[in-house]
Amino acid sequence: MRTKICGITSFEDAMSAVDAGANALGFVFYEKSPRFITVQKAKEIISKLPPFVEKVALFVNESAKNIDEICKQTGATLAQLHFDVTQEFCDSLTTPHIKVIRAKSAENILDFKDEYRLVDAYCEAYGGTGKRINIEWFKDIDCSKIILAGGLNSSNVSDLKIYGFYGVDVSSGVEISHGKKDTLKVKEFIHNAQ
């Protein structure tokens, strides 16, 4: 499974995740998040990263114009849309993007089933809450285009291999505190996911 370490707020955390084998890093441009990062700080980190690492910018209730502008300014390579969007909205973006399904029920995980998508547990807050989705919902469905998020950590991620997820996304499960990653937890998470 491919791995994304989300809620990166420092170059040190970014590089420890890259060195551990992370395929993608997440940067949160949502001011109410404890992992919020400014455009300038994200740009500083992203500009020093090695090639072949996906730089994902996470947005909540942002305009298409701002999403494109922030990704362009920072060097982010993919926008993660953590809110309900229309096809018209998505078509207006010039930045490659991925939709997030905040699943309330088993039916929700089939939304956008022909697209790569991120599936997270529904909660009032947006991301990084550590709430786990009901894994039983994924039994007998094609998970090859799903990136799973929500309540993951190094001790439960290896249990997911049987489902065939495209990837996994972790934030709070590898942290010392909000926005500060634990290098050992990051290494263990990536190792156990692979």
Image (tube, helix red, strand yellow):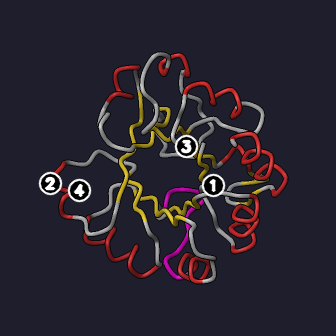
- Where is residue 128? Give x, y as percent: 58, 46
Residue 39: within the magenta?
A: yes
Compared to 70, does 138 lie above or below?
above
- Where is residue 115? Give x, y as percent: 32, 42
How far is the residue under mark 2 from the one under mark 1? 29 Å
| Pointers 3 and 2 in contact (C-beta within 8 Å) | no
- Where is residue 54? Give x, y as percent: 52, 64
Question: In what quadrant of the picture does the C terminus appear?
Answer: top right
Magenta span main SS: loop
| Amino acid at circle 3 | Gly
How far is the residue under mark 2 from the one under mark 4? 5 Å
Q: Is residue 148 left or right of residue 161?
A: left
Element on which disc 4 rests: helix
Asked whether 109 or 63 is in front, the reply is: 109
Compared to 81, does 154 lie above or below?
above
Q: Which residue is mark 1?
A: 5
Compared to 169, does 76 lie above or below?
below
Disc ID at residue 88? 2
Element on which disc 1 rests: strand
Disc ID at residue 167? 3
